[in-house]
């Protein structure tokens, strides 16, 4: 926290303002001043890496980089992008680092947070959240432009990360990726110390209880992966949302929240660990919330496995008030067997989709006609 006295980083890109800011930092003994001058002078990458290494040592961030879980880059004396993946490590060394972060609080880990030090240190699955919070509560992280958080001990760290993220306004954060890896939705996860994590325990309340969207005014791209992460996603400026899994705490797939600027919605949802595919009835919920996304133009369902055939999916979409607004639609496949009407069914649906570009991620098989004929019947089809 040695540089807290020096404030007033320029909000724009005026070179003179940044050089003046660099001089103030240097006068305060902060090596970020030298880094800013070198950037402005066009110094090569190796020289900048060397100087920012000095900055990291000065700010107490060198130990976080050495741990290996964080990767981050700098611009203008502030962190510009950062990505977290819990790295394998010696438990004793990581415990020592976590103890330092919790007791010395280098870089601004909030002094008013009520910490149970014994609990934090005795439970290794609490450590991921401490490593994340240590960076996100540091003032040099407040100008992050891109942030990627891939969690392991998400039953603890999802809320810890959200709380740290919401602790200060992030005026430049344009892209956020948040969640955890899984093969099958709702499968049990494995914590870093070997414990079993049951996602279903978080159904309803959600993994994240802190509202973060108000702290991210510049957010434009959001990528969420997992189950039951957030209660809602409400944001006035978000333009692209990609989800993998049932990311809303009540299990909804198509109810992310009110997103008046959203233009692109991409969904990925395969059969879950119980072998259950996404109900086509979920598309009815999408229809009832159409007013929440007045500017949606691209809907990508190419990686959604429904419990119904293509004709039912297209029929449900044809009834949606969203459809006339769309410019592009991607579906998983275009398979219509003869018992579902084949070309006649396709011809009945085609007028509803004539105004947009229809992309098919997988097979195109309409029983009774060839692919060329499908293209003539359905002009919206994009090869």
Image: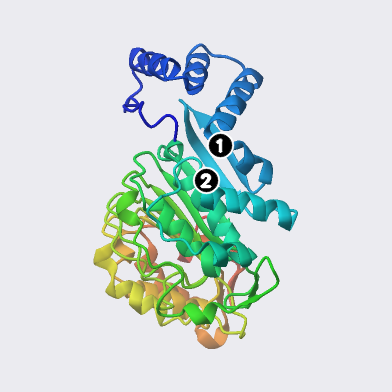
Between the C-alphas of marks 1 and 2, the distance is: 10 Å
* 76 vs 251, nearest the viewer: 76
In the rendered image, the vertical position of residue 348 relative to residue 55, given as above or below: below
Q: Quadrant of residue 337?
A: bottom right
Q: Which residue does the numbered mark 2 point to in the structure image? A: 104
Rendered view: 127 above or below 76: below
Where is residue 334 shown, x and y percent of the image?
54, 70
The residue lying furthest to the bottom in this view is: 339
Residue 302 in view here:
no
Q: Residues within 10 Å of mark 1 (few under 14, many from 20)?
A: some
**Looking at the picture, does residue 217 appear above or below residue 334?**
above
Instruction: Decide: is 54 above or below 372.
Output: above
Closer-to-camera residue (129/17):
129
Check disc 2: other Cα within 10 Å, few if <14, some if 14-19, many if 20+: few
Could you say which is closer to the camera, residue 146 or residue 347?
A: 146
In the orientation shown, which residue stands out farthest toward the right? 90
Residue at coordinates 45% horizontally, 76% vertically from top-left?
313
The C terminus sits in image quarter: bottom right
Query: What x and y, as percent, mark residue 51?
Result: 59, 21
Q: Are marks 1 and 2 in contact (CB under 8 Å)?
A: yes
Q: Residue at x 62, y 84 (%)?
A: 275
| Quadrant housing the N terminus | top left
| Relative to 173, 335 lies left or right | right
Name the residue tied to disc 1. Answer: 60
Residue 325, position as x, y percentages in the image: 30, 59
Determine whether the residue tagged by mark 1 lies in a helix, strand or loop: loop
Q: Along the polypeptide, which appears first: circle 1 or circle 2?
A: 1
Instruction: Using the image, tell me which numbered label, if any, was put on residue 69.
Output: none
Residue 174: tell me if it is visible: yes
């Amino acid at each position: 926290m040695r540089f807290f006295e020096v404030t007033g980083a320029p909000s724009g890109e005026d070179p003179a303002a940044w050089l003046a800011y660099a001089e103030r930092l240097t006068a305060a003994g902060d090596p970020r001043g030298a880094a800013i001058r070198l950037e402005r002078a066009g110094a090569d990458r190796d020289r900048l890496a060397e100087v920012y290494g000095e900055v990291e040592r000065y700010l107490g961030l060198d130990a976080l980089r050495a741990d290996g879980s964080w990767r981050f880059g700098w611009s203008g004396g502030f962190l510009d992008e950062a990505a977290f993946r819990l790295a394998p490590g010696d438990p004793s060394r990581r415990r020592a680092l976590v103890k330092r972060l919790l007791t010395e609080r280098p870089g601004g880990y909030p002094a008013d947070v009520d910490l149970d030090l014994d609990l934090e240190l005795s439970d290794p699955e609490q450590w991921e959240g401490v490593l994340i919070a240590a960076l996100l509560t540091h003032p040099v992280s407040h100008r992050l432009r891109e942030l990627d958080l891939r969690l392991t001990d998400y039953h603890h760290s999802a809320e810890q990360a959200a709380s740290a993220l919401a602790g200060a306004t992030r005026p430049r954060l344009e892209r956020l990726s948040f969640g955890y890896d899984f093969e099958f939705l709702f499968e049990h996860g494995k914590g870093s110390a070997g414990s079993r994590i049951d996602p279903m325990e978080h159904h309803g309340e959600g993994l994240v209880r802190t509202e973060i969207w108000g702290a991210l005014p510049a957010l434009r791209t959001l990528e969420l992966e997992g189950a039951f992460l957030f209660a809602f996603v409400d944001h006035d400026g978000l333009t692209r949302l990609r989800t993998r899994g049932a990311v809303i705490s009540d299990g909804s797939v198509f109810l992310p929240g009110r997103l008046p600027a959203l233009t692109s919605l991409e969904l990925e949802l395969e059969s879950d660990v119980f072998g259950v595919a996404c109900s086509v009835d979920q598309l009815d919920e999408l229809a009832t919330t159409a007013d929440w996304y007045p500017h949606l133009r691209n809907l990508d369902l190419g990686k959604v496995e429904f419990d119904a055939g293509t004709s039912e999916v297209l029929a449900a979409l044809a009834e949606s008030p969203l459809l006339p607004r769309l410019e592009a639609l991607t579906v998983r496949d275009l398979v219509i067997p003869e018992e579902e009407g084949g070309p006649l069914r396709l011809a009945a649906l085609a007028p509803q989709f004539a105004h947009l570009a229809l992309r098919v991620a997988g097979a195109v098989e309409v029983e009774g006609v060839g692919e060329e004929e499908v293209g003539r019947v359905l002009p919206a089809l994009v090869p």
